[in-house]
Image (cartoon, grey):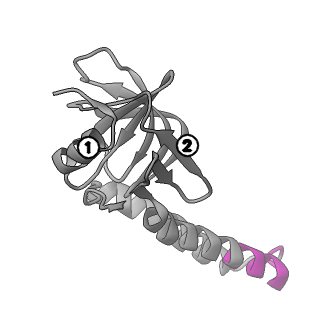
Amino acid sequence: MKIPLAAARAPALLRAVTWGVPVLLVVVAFLPDEDNTPLLQGAIIVLALVIFAWFQLAPRRLAYTLTSDAVVIQRMLNQTRLPYAGLSARRTAGVLGLRTFGTGLPGYLTGHFTLAHDGQGVSRVRAAASTGQGGVLLCSGDADYFLTPANPDAFLTELTRRGAQVAA
């Protein structure tokens, strides 16, 4: 069962800076300079296109799927399986903070983040989120995962139905 993600929210300045990177690379490729050979121009343009493609594809690759035995979190380059056995879940008022390792694009927040204002003591999470707040925490083993389903209550209800422990 595919779970829809929460709508991505990012400040306009962050989106402008993010999209400005590939645009700036293309502009730099065409700056007049005797060291700027056609080969170098081509390499810079290819790099800009790769970055542009990454920015376009990454948010579309983020997905949550509930299988018969686990929550599967799909990211751009890999996936994580969290078996329902031993899985606990709850809503959180926490907000993603500092990214310590991973990717932070508008609509695609993955990797290790700090978590502020959780209220239950969780301060570090592994995020796979479309936005930095309004999430659900999944605890599996010694790791906490921050996810942002579009309908957190329905997601938690379905996890309960499948055998995960869900806190009120």
Whether residue 114 is in magenta: the answer is no
Indicate the quadrant containing the N terminus: top left, top right, bottom left or bottom right: bottom left
| x then y, percent, for residue 101 | 57, 36
In the rendered image, which residue does mark 1 sit on? 161
| x then y, percent, for residue 90 | 25, 31
Q: Nearer the viewer, residue 132 or 19?
A: 132
Q: Secondary structure at mark 2?
A: strand
| x then y, percent, for residue 153 | 17, 45
What residue appears at the point 30 percent right and 25 percent down from the top-left corner? 116
The residue mark sitting in front, 1 or 2, is 1
Magenta segment's dominant SS is helix
Which residue occupies the extreme top position in the image?
121
Q: Determine which quarter of the picture holds residue 84.
A: top left
Q: Amino acid at mark 1?
A: Arg
Compared with 153, 78 (above or below) is below
Q: Which contiguous range is marked in magenta?
A: 35-45
Mark 2, Cα crowd under 10 Å, few <14 / some 14-19 / many 20+, is some
Q: Nearer the viewer, residue 85 or 10?
A: 85
What residue appears at the point 55 percent right and 46 percent down from the top-left corner? 80
What residue appears at the point 59 percent right and 67 percent down from the top-left corner? 51
Horizontal relation, residue 110 to residue 29: left or right = left
Q: Determine which quarter of the picture holds residue 2.
A: bottom left
For residue 102, the mark is 2
Horizontal relation, residue 42 to residue 7: left or right = right
Horizontal relation, residue 20 to residue 129: left or right = right
Whether residue 43 is in magenta: the answer is yes
